[in-house]
Image: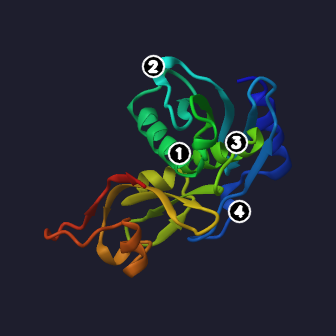
Amino acid sequence: MEGSTQTDAKIRTDYGTDSSSRGPGCSLRHFACEQNLLSRPDGSASFLQGDTSVLAGVYGPAEVKVSKEIFNKATLEVILRPKIGLPGVAEKSRERLIRNTCEAVVLGALHPRTSITIVLQVISDAGSLLACCLNAACMALVDAGVPMQALFCGVTCALDTDGTLMLDPTAKQEKEARAVLTFALDSVEQKLLMSTTKGLFSDAERPWSGEEGDAFGIFPSPPASPGGWRGGGLSR
């Protein structure tokens, strides 16, 4: 996607990305966003979290192929392109999670029989990639003027071997973590739009515990086996 390298370098210079400067535990890396970077898409945005950077472009609402047409709402597609090579299973899984999140907030009924396409290009992946993709997609939708009932954000957290919770983990921290969890929340009621988990963690280590977490369906009742929680994914 045009201008991605220059834009990424500009943001890095202006804001800095040294993840070592943040405090331990529940603190975030430096983040930055810039909109309206590309000329061809109807909306675009670059989002930077530490050394993780994603460039997003939104096309539409536009004409849709007859085979993909939905009579009462817009057809929403997400394309995630890795930094190098062709998309694989991991990219297809992230595409589904991002699409489900966007469909929960985009007012597609206002543009029936049209297509809205979100193209995400990974510039660099230094951890918390899915959260960065979600944030880039939201900012690009805003730049394109796509009607939404709320904004949304993505956040990733990790549990290390001693049970300490880390927000916005780096790639190294994700690799060493016992569990990695990513959530998408809306800006109006702070509702859970999507969650996906990877790894093993106990009921006591749930980031959301009690009635709030159970109501969202993030984590159901504890399993009968003593093994603890195993990663999976869901979207609302």
Q: Which is more N-terminal, label 1 or label 3?
A: 1
Any part of residue 44 in sight: yes
Q: Residue at x 53, y 45 (%)?
A: 103
Q: Which is more N-terminal, label 2 or label 1?
A: 2
Residue 156 position, x and y percent, is: 52, 58
Q: Residue at x 25, y 72 (%)?
A: 221
Residue tagged by mark 4?
21
Considering the numbered disc 2 on the image, is that residue within a helix, a strand or a loop?
helix
Residue tagged by mark 2?
67
Query: Disc 1 and disc 2: Cα gap in Å?
Result: 19 Å
Rendered-image quadrant of the C terminus:
bottom left
Instruction: Work out whether 28 lies above or below 60.
Output: below
In front of the other: label 3 or label 4? 3
Amino acid type, callout 2: Ser
Judged left or right of residue 163, residue 1 is right
Residue 99 position, x and y percent, is: 50, 41
Residue tagged by mark 3?
146
Instruction: Work out whether 231 lies above or below 224.
Output: above
Q: How many marks?
A: 4
Q: Residue at x 77, y 42 (%)?
A: 143
